[in-house]
């Protein structure tokens, strides 16, 4: 069996960083990254981007050395992706924050509202309902992160955790402040409005969860396979007929429900910002599906049936 | 190519200073600080847009390039000083009149206090101004002195 030689150069300076001899032909990029870390321990595999061309795309961890267009001496270019943090860690942190922060406002912990309101309770039913809904939503997200989602990537850049937590924690505090405020005004159309909005919220939460389970079932544990999602026996998944990312559709629906239920403008703004971001993600995912699968159902839109 | 974000921030701050401060709060229109930022902006914009225009026409006189990358060294701090002093002068009027503000209770369960918004705006100059200033200084070194600047890795 002929062994390969691999030299790794810095993509920017072309400096020779590492020379590996006697590399097995069926070695994967992941294994090469591990070998590289041995000589440069500060660059753990998750922060390495290796490519055939300094300006080209990153090679995948699963790629096999002898299948690449290289001679028996392969030249790979290295780019440092910066400090990395796992997706799971980011998700758990960014979701635990709102859960905890909202409750601080709900229980009217001192120094938020005037002292005479410390630890008092709202007399409006909708305020208690809102706390249950908000808390349920984030508990659901935490459990899904731990037990349901199958992530394509292990890590993301470290700075994302600061950006993401500021967004989630900041908005949670802003919404919670008004909903739990002693001067909170309940919805204009009273119990009818609350009931309808609660129904929307619950249906969309069930829908969102159904989609997450359906997506999980598409992908075996520990794999990164991609398949076209299709409707299952669960009626909530029938939205796949019209939309590529029904999980996002249901998520927007949940927050619209919550906004109508609480009749709180900051909630509406949070829904709008979330909708904007999810639309960008949905369009990207939709484009990936179209590129990867020739037979992708033509009726589907990215996030809103027939429209967007 | 200019950054959309940087230009966006700059244009927004101009619109804010003109319409939401100077136009809306009549008493501060007599402040000297208003003259300060108006003069700084005027000279800056004439230089900047001449630079853009001549660049697009592919006929850029050196003194315009020189002006665009040197005037800002003085004009930028002068303009910022004028803006901050003007906002500071406006504070008592904003507090007294409660303008542009919404208080609780209201049916949309939101509040906005323009006075605190202005305080936060003033504070935001502290991180933003040095970033923009040093960005221009780096551009200056690159354009006028042909220095090769190795960008920090992302």
Image: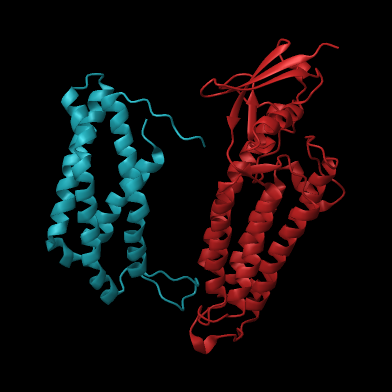
Chain colours: A red, B cyan
Q: Quadrant of the N terminus of chain A?
A: top right
Identify the residue at horizontal 82%, vertical 37% (top origin). A223
Rendered location of residue A36, percent (x, y): 68, 29
Would you place residue A253 above or below residue B70 in this image?
below
Identify the residue at horizontal 13%, vertical 62% (top origin). B31
Can see residue B127?
A: yes
The total of numbered circles placed on residues is 0
Would you place residue A281 above or below residue A287 in this image?
below
Q: Quadrant of the C terminus of chain A?
A: top right
Is B126 situated left or right of A89 in this image?
left
Rendered location of residue A110, percent (x, y): 54, 82
Is A13 situated left or right of B126 in this image?
right
Seen from this angle, which residue lies furthest bottom?
A116
Can see residue A308?
A: no
Identify the residue at horizontal 46%, vertical 35% (top origin). B152
Rendered location of residue A206, percent (x, y): 77, 59
* Residue A78 in which image quadrant: top right
Identify the residue at horizontal 26%, vertical 24% (top origin). B55
Rendered location of residue B17, percent (x, y): 26, 55
Which sits in the foreground, A297 or A18?
A: A18
Would you place residue B66 above or below residue B106 in this image?
above
Which sits in the foreground, B38 or A157?
A: A157
């Amino acid at each position: 069996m002929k062994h390969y030689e691999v030299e790794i150069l810095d993509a920017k300076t072309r400096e020779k960083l590492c020379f590996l001899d006697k590399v097995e032909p069926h070695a994967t990029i992941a294994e090469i990254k591990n070998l590289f870390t041995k000589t440069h321990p500060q660059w753990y595999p998750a922060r390495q981007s290796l490519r055939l061309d300094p300006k080209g795309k990153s090679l995948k961890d699963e790629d096999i050395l002898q299948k690449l267009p290289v001679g028996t001496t392969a030249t790979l270019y290295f780019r440092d992706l910066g400090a990395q943090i796992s997706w799971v860690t980011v998700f758990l942190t960014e979701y635990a924050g709102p859960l905890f922060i909202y409750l601080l406002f709900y229980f009217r912990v001192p120094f938020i509202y005037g002292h005479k309101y410390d630890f008092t309770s709202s007399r409006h039913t909708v305020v208690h309902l809102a706390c249950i809904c908000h808390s349920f939503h984030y508990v659901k997200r935490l459990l899904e992160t731990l037990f349901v989602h199958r992530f394509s990537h292990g890590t993301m850049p470290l700075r994302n955790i600061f950006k993401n937590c500021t967004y989630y924690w900041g908005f949670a505090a802003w919404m919670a402040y008004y909903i739990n405020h002693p001067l909170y005004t309940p919805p204009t159309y009273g119990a009818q409005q609350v009931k309808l909005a609660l129904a929307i919220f619950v249906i969309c939460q069930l829908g969102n969860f159904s989609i997450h389970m359906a997506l999980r079932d598409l992908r075996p544990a520990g794999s990164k396979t991609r398949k076209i999602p299709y409707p299952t026996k669960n009626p909530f998944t029938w939205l796949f007929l019209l939309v590529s990312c029904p999980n996002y559709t249901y998520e927007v629906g949940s927050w619209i429900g919550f906004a109508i239920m609480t009749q709180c403008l900051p909630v509406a703004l949070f829904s709008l910002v979330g909708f904007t971001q999810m639309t960008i993600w949905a369009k990207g995912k939709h484009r990936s599906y179209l590129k990867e699968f020739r037979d992708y159902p033509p009726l589907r839109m990215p996030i809103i049936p027939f429209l967007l | 190519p200019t950054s959309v974000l940087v230009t966006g921030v700059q244009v927004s701050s101009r619109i804010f200073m003109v319409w939401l401060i100077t136009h809306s709060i009549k008493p501060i229109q007599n402040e000297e600080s208003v003259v300060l930022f108006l003069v700084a902006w005027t000279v800056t914009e004439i230089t900047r847009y001449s630079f853009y225009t001549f660049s697009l026409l592919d006929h850029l006189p050196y003194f315009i390039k020189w002006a665009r990358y040197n005037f800002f060294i003085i004009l930028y701090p002068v303009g910022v000083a004028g803006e901050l002093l003007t906002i500071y002068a406006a504070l008592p009027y904003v507090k007294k009149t409660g303008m542009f503000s919404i208080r609780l209770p209201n049916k949309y369960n939101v509040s906005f206090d323009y006075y605190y918004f202005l305080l936060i705006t003033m504070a935001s100059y502290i991180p933003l101004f040095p970033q923009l200033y040093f960005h221009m200084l780096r551009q200056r070194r690159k354009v006028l002195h042909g220095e090769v600047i190795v960008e920090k890795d992302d």
